[in-house]
Image: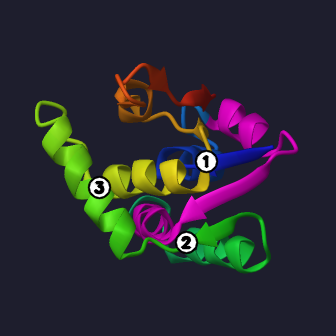
Amino acid sequence: MNLFVDSSAFYAAADAGDEHHARARAALGGGDRLLTSDHVFAESWSLLERRLGWDAAERFWGAIRGGVAAVEYVGPEDLEVAWSIGEAFPDQGFSLTDRTSFALMLRTGVHRAASFDKDFAVFRFGARRERAFEIVR
């Protein structure tokens, strides 16, 4: 089964001192095919470099290069959907990376996410916004 991985899960899995570390490692090691976006990849690398240092960020990049997660690229259509998500949820303040993640997940049909970011649990989709992503923590 496919599992979209957000920056919060990548970070928690890398930082042994993070309160979600064990749960993140379990979620990412659960046998699912891991998928992320190029935006999440860049955000995760920057977060790791800033908080844990260059070596941690480079280990993360090496793991991505080694195939730990497939990287899906955000395209022009995804950017348009991300813009419309911002218009539909103006009170939520979803970040650019979150909005493009939601758009990519909708395009690829991946409705499960490893994330400790509340926005993944808040977002709703479908004709009447009746569906939510399944959050794996």
Q: Amino acid at mark 3?
A: Ala
Quadrant the N terminus occupies: top right
Label at residue 109: 1
Is 52 placed above or below 109 here? below
Q: Please, what secondary structure does the residue beneath circle 2 have?
A: helix
- Of label 1 and label 2, which has the lower sequence position? 2
Q: What number of labels is visible?
A: 3
C-alpha gap between disc 3 and disc 1: 15 Å
Label at residue 57: 2
Front: mark 1 or 2: 1
Determine the residue positioned at 59% across, 27% down: 134
Label at residue 82: 3
Q: Nearer the viewer, residue 51 or 46?
A: 46
C-alpha gap between disc 1 and disc 2: 29 Å
Is residue 15 visible to us here? no
- Give yes or no for residue 32 being in the magenta stretch: yes
Q: Is residue 77 left or right of residue 18?
A: left
Q: Residues within 10 Å of mark 1 (few under 14, many from 20)?
A: few
